[in-house]
Image: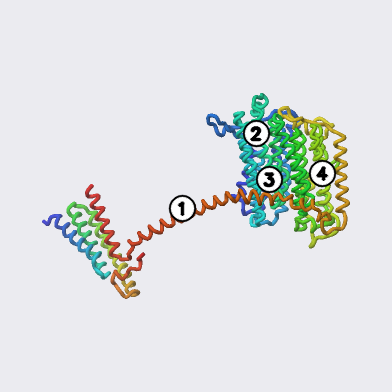
């Protein structure tokens, strides 16, 4: 019962705000905040229950939705350690971001619409997290896509924002197409959509490897779209056109992590198909490296953080690919805290400086102390400095890569750690230290914004200790339950931890040397690699000139032809012509002569009389 | 005693003359007068029936219609006078503003 309540409260809030309290802005925001906070309170009980019983059995509640011979679809909820963890992340980070939004969006004309969309998003996200079958997860998968579309295009009067929202939606559709095909392949092989039943059938075996491989790859398509992996990574940086709290909630902490969650949900499938896992691992590793390099050469504070998110998502997917399900989920959790923190702090900086360009800030720390301090803590966590949360979770991923003998991916992971430390250092020094380059009088944000920052900062610093390898039970004990595949835990490897610490410190040192001085523009500008990275390796141009120009425009030409000729000429103009011509004939009867009308009337009466008289 | 059919034939004759007047005459005054003729032919048939069926309803009904007709004529003539003042004509074929 509680799970259904958790699922539907945000929907009720969204409907209520849209149809009833739209005019009352304050009330709307309180309804939305209240809904998500109430869900957080409701989800405390399952969390405590999980902490008491580490190896809990999954709890399912479902009813039959579509039941015809050969097809049985349910609607249901599933509570297991994985979904409880995600529930905690979504409700907790979501609550803080909702509260923060009240300050950030203050005075915006679309205030109520913003909170209605946020509630809709929370509802959809709960739907994904709590689903117990593939059809339901797909429906909510699309719903988060919709709410993401609505929120990226929140400033729809800005062409760049509406373009970005369309881009995000369409690029996601490509991945989702593969996802639903994968669901069908898996359904054909197993005859059910239910996660637990599928796992039972997979454990029994007997399904051909090629089918498993195909299903795993197709389902991975969905994750590639939603978690913005190469080659569908192009939508996420553009999604930063949305308001900053949206970037923090949807495009950093929760929705984009849904792809990783999906991989964890179907871990057994990947476990049985090692070839598919290799693909997953290399796509993840490549995305992590690509995004990290691009992040070095961006000048927009939100874009740097966005590319770092891409890089982190690549890291998580790589962890999933090498069998480190626990490591990936651990990174997802800590990442949700420190990345939400980074985005919210970035939003607070933008709020203060009214610009997103880091070269127009500089020396910001003096003006926005709380924001600055929390941002630096978040950066340290992101860079993976001991003992911040990022260190422990990154270390688990690296250990998983190392112990599964993926040495090439391990090297990429180390390289990404180095670059991440470097660009986070660059971001911090250029934005918060050095010489003053801003105009006007920046001021610190109100407490409604800084308090969530402080709470998130605490979690960004400390949440890593949940996964300390030396203590039992730790994070892995809960997540790597008996029903999941994957390698489980990896322990602590001093070689890996030492190496990652050294490269992270080296990255910070390099960043310090290059950027901790008086600067007006990036000293690396002019470098060929910098140019390439600054232009995101021309992926957008490539897609525009080849895929969009050739295929998309081809389809557009056909649609345009059909629209102009069939719909406009045949239907619209055809009906108008018909009406006009019949009107021309009919108006001959209106002569304006009184006696004509009277004659017709008398004739009518006589005709009626004859007709009924004859009967 | 005069049989019912005589009354009804008279009523029919009056009705037909009225309809012909409405349809054929040019002056709107004559048209209005023809309308009155139609009206009264109906009244005539109503009282004739009432008399032969020994029913009060028909007589009462006729009194009502005469009253209403008087009011209608007053309004109709008023409109006619207004139209004449504006148009300086009482010929129906010239009052054809509702064409097309």
Find residue A501 and name its label.
Answer: none
Tell me the residue at 79%/62% (across/down).
A439
* Residue A176 in the image, given as x and y percentages of width and height: 63, 41
Q: Which residue is mark 3?
A: A34
Given residues A172 and A276, the one toward you in this image is A276
Tell me the residue at 28%/59% (across/down).
A600
Question: Mark 3 falls on what kind of element?
Answer: helix
Q: What chain does badge 4 belong to?
A: A
Q: Are marks 3 and 1 on the same chain?
A: yes
Find residue A214 and name its label.
Answer: 2
* Residue A278 in the image, given as x and y percentages of width and height: 73, 34
Crowding near the residue tagged with mark 3, few <14, some 14–19, many ≥20 C-alpha atoms within 10 Å: some
Q: Is residue A564 above or below residue A6?
A: below
Q: Are marks 4 and 2 on the same chain?
A: yes
Crowding near the residue tagged with mark 4, few <14, some 14–19, many ≥20 C-alpha atoms within 10 Å: many
Residue farthest along the left direction in this orientation:
B1
Q: Is residue A9 above or below residue A158?
A: above
């Amino acid at each position: 019962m509680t799970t259904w309540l958790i699922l539907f409260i945000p929907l009720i809030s969204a409907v209520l705000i849209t149809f009833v309290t739209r005019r009352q802005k304050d009330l709307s925001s309180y309804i939305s905040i209240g809904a998500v906070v109430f869900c957080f309170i409701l989800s405390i009980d399952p969390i405590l229950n999980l902490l008491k019983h580490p190896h809990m059995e999954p709890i399912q509640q479902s009813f039959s939705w579509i039941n015809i011979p050969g097809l049985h679809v349910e609607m249901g909820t599933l509570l297991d350690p994985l979904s409880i963890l995600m529930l905690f992340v979504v409700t907790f980070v979501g609550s803080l971001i909702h509260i923060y939004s009240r300050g950030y969006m203050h005075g915006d004309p679309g205030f109520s619409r913003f909170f209605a969309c946020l509630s809709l998003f929370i509802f959809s996200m709960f739907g994904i997290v709590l689903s117990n079958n593939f059809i339901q997860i797909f429906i909510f998968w699309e719903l988060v896509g919709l709410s993401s579309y609505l929120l990226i295009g929140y400033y729809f009067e800005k062409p760049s924002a509406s373009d970005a929202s369309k881009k995000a939606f369409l690029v996601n559709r490509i991945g989702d197409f593969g996802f639903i095909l994968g669901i069908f392949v898996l359904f054909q092989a197993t005859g059910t959509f239910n996660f637990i039943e599928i796992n039972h059938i997979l454990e029994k075996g007997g399904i051909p490897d090629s089918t498993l491989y195909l299903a795993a790859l197709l389902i991975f398509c969905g994750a590639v779209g939603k978690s913005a992996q190469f080659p569908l990574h192009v939508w996420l940086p553009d999604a930063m056109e949305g308001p900053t709290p949206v970037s923090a909630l949807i495009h950093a902490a929760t929705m984009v992590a849904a792809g990783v969650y999906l991989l964890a949900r179907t871990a057994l499938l990947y476990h049985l198909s090692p070839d598919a896992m290799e693909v997953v691992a290399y796509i993840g590793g490549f995305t992590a490296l690509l995004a990290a390099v691009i992040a070095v050469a961006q000048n927009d504070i939100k874009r740097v953080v966005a590319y770092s998110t891409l890089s982190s998502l690549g890291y998580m997917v790589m962890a999933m690919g090498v069998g480190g399900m626990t490591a990936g989920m651990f990174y997802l959790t800590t990442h949700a805290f420190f990345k939400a923190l980074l985005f919210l702090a970035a939003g607070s900086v933008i709020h203060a400086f009214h610009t997103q360009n880091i070269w127009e800030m500089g020396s910001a720390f003096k003006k926005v102390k709380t924001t600055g301090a929390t941002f630096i803590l978040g950066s340290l966590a992101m860079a993976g400095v001991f003992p911040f949360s990022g260190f422990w979770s990154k270390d688990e991923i690296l250990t998983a890569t190392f112990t599964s003998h993926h040495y090439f991916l391990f090297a990429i992971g180390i390289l990404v750690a180095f670059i991440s430390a470097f660009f986070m250092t660059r971001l911090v020094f250029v934005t918060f230290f050095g010489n003053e380059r801003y105009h006007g009088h920046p001021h610190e944000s109100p407490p409604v914004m800084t308090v969530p920052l402080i709470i998130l900062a605490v979690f960004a610093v400390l949440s890593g200790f949940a996964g300390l390898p030396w203590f039992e039970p730790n994070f892995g004990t809960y997540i790597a339950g008996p029903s999941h595949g994957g390698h489980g835990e990896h322990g602590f490897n001093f070689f890996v931890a030492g190496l990652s610490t050294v490269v992270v410190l080296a990255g910070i040192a390099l960043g310090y040397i290059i950027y901790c001085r008086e600067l007006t523009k990036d000293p690396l500008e002019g470098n060929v690699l910098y140019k390439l990275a600054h232009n995101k390796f021309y992926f957008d141009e490539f897609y525009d000139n080849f895929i969009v120009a050739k295929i998309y425009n081809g389809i557009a030409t056909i649609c345009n032809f059909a629209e102009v000729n069939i719909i406009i000429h045949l239907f619209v103009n055809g009906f108008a012509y018909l009406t006009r011509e019949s009107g021309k004939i009919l108006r001959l009867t209106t002569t304006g002569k009184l006696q004509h009308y009277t004659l017709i009337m008398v004739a009518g009466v006589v005709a009626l009389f004859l007709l009924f008289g004859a009967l | 005693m005069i049989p019912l059919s005589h009354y009804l034939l008279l009523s029919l004759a009056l009705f037909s003359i009225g309809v012909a007047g409405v349809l054929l005459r040019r002056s709107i005054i004559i048209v209005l007068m023809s309308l009155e003729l139609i009206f009264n032919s109906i009244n005539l048939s109503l009282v004739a029936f009432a008399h032969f069926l020994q029913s009060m309803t028909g007589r009462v009904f006729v009194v009502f219609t005469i009253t209403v007709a008087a009011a209608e004529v007053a309004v109709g003539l008023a409109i006619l006078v207004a139209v004449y003042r504006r148009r300086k004509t009482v010929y129906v074929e010239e009052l054809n503003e509702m064409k097309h």
